[in-house]
Amino acid sequence: MSRPLRIAYENALYHITSRGQRRENIFFDDKDKNTFIRKSDETFTKYGITCYAYCLMDNHYHLFIKTAKPNLSQALHYLNTSYANWFGSRYQMIGSLFQGRFKSILVDADSYALILSAYMHLNPIRAGIVSKLEDYPWSSYLDYLGLRKSQMVNLDPSLVLHYFSADATLSTKKYKEYLWQNQSMEDPLKQSYHNIALGDDHFIKLLKSRIAKKGLSREIPVTRSLPLYSAPEIIEKVCDVTHLDQNRLMSKERGNRYRSLALYLIKKFTPLKLTQIGQLFDMDYSAVSQAVKRFENKFKEDRDLERTKEKVISALKKE
């Protein structure tokens, strides 16, 4: 079977689905779903992705996202691998969790963002799991209505809600009514262009032109490591904020918490693998993972360190 055409460019919007092998469950309980949401948000932060909607079902998931950089394949590989490894460890499972590669369809926001988000959020009703969407916590619907604190830092319902009004109260009311009136809506993805893109004629015409210029390559463009930030940028900003030179920052002296801060931020905000980060810091990849976990706990007890981290992130965003 040939690999699907994967078109990637800056600020592209996608509908993503990934199913369990033989349509078996990829989520068995709340802990599984919460872990996937957390790992999704980590992935979105790491790869500069905005999530507009999501819905988790027992044997598959839906994401509606925008990639700031043409790095869709790396991001979804990271997410699925990270969750599958965690899942396999928890349930002592051997073999693939997901059924092949994830499926992605480009989305024209102007024509289909509202329809697509509604169709995704209505999944639990179509499946007969609930009769009221408010009773299903494993989608972004409750976040759209403002009924809870968002479980994702990178979730942004405003793209869809602004179709109705810039006023938050009115837009959520209208969105709820829209879903209630369209519970039996047909799958909009059936209208996609060769399972590649979902949009109006103008959107498809522009897409065809983009594909033609790239010669129908399987990955357009060939996506290399395109992080939101680079490791040298992060190291430079940590040095600036802490007033340390790079040699002092990277020294292995005991208690060098700013070295640990740089390591943590590189793991969080770049798509570098653990082995690559380990090479930067002269560490084994497993030591990198352990160091990051230990350092995350320090933020809870060290407010000064937390403030330093936020200053570095703020400095990066100003670039």
Image (cartoon, grey):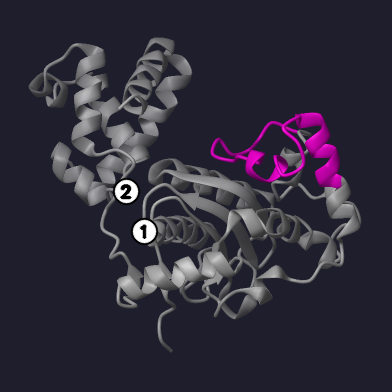
Q: Which residues are magenta?
A: 148-176
Q: Residue 5's spot in the image, x, y percent? A: 42, 76
Q: Is residue 263 left or right of residue 282?
A: right
Q: Residue 61's spot in the image, x, y percent? A: 62, 61
Q: Quadrant of residue 148?
A: top right
- Residue on which the image places disc 1: 74
The reply to whether callout 1 and callout 2 are in contact (CB within 8 Å) is yes
Q: Is residue 95 left or right of residue 231?
A: right
Q: Residue 215's spot in the image, x, y percent? A: 30, 77
Q: Residue 151's spot in the image, x, y percent? A: 63, 38
Please, is residue 107 above or below residue 257 in the view? below
Q: Quadrant of residue 25?
A: bottom right
Q: Residue furthest toward the bottom?
A: 1
Q: Is residue 130 magenta?
A: no
Instruction: Say which amino acid is labelled 1.
Output: Gln
Residue 271 got which mark? 2
Label whose residue precedes the other's in the sequence (1 or 2): 1
Question: Which residue is at 36% across, 17% downward?
Answer: 311
Instruction: Say which amino acid is labelled 2.
Output: Pro
Q: Does the image show residue 233?
A: yes
Question: Which residue is at 88% across, 47% downward?
Answer: 177
Please, is residue 21 above or below residue 222 in the view? below
Decide which of 28, 184 is in the foreground and name it. Answer: 184
